[in-house]
Every structure is written in structure tokens, then in C-alpha cells.
Image (cartoon, grey):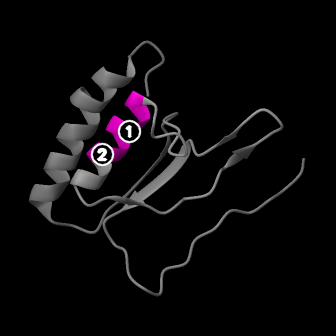
Amino acid sequence: RHPCMDETSFIEDYMKPLNDKLAVENKKTYITGDFNFDLSNTTNKESFNFFETMMSSFHLPVITLPTKINPKAHTIIDNIFTNQIHPDMKSGNLSISI
């Protein structure tokens, strides 16, 4: 997301049109990025709106566990969404200490 753009504008101006275009094309898609919407905190209005926008186009999150873990916060801000969910699909996080 552009650092000068607010969350609502990003969702309305970029994510909704992208999801609409992808829905018309009816292709298998993966959308990835560090969107800075914390999916572990959907009580936050912007995070909820982002999650709802993705789910409304059948893009489900692949990452469901915190990707940033520190003593102050555990967040899910690195996201992968796909419209290709099947029972054999497996995902997870690698824990590496640097």
C-alpha cells in the first residue's frame, strides 16, 4: 500500500476493482503482499473491511497464524489470498531466529 494513501482509499480504489476484474476473468489467482492489515485483529475497522473485501470475492487467506511475533504484538500482516482452496492444501509459517 502506498504510504500516503489511507486504508479506506486503498481498499476502495485498488482492491475492490482488482477483485472485480479477477472475478470476471474467472482464473485461479493468488494475491500476496505485506498489506499492513492485521487479520488477527478484525475488530479494527480497516482490517475487517480488507478481510471482507477479499472474502466477498472468494479469496481466502492461506496464512492464518501470526507472521510477526514479538513480546508486544502478534500480527498477521503478511498475506496470501487465493481462490483455489482444496482439502489437500497445506500452509504454515517457518520460525527462524536471526
Q: Which three-letter amino acid code belongs to the residue tagged 1?
A: Phe
- Judge the density around disc 1: few (<14), some (14-19), many (≥20) Cα neighbours within 10 Å: some
Disc marking residue 60? none
Residue stretch in magenta? 45-53
- Judge the density around disc 2: few (<14), some (14-19), many (≥20) Cα neighbours within 10 Å: some
Q: Quadrant of residue 59?
A: bottom left
Residue position for label 2: 52
Q: Is residue 25 shown above or below 98?
A: below
Residue position for label 1: 48
Q: Is residue 95 shown above or below 70?
A: below
Mark 2: which secondary structure?
helix
Looking at the image, residue 33 sits to the left or right of residue 74; the answer is left
Q: Quadrant of residue 69?
A: top right
> Cβ–Cβ below 8 Å for labels 2 and 1?
yes
The percent coordinates of residue 35 (x first, y second) are 48, 37
- Most extreme residue toward the front is 43
- Most extreme residue toward the top is 4
The percent coordinates of residue 36 (x first, y second) are 52, 33
Q: Which three-letter amino acid code belongs to the residue tagged 2?
A: Glu
- Most extreme residue toward the left is 24
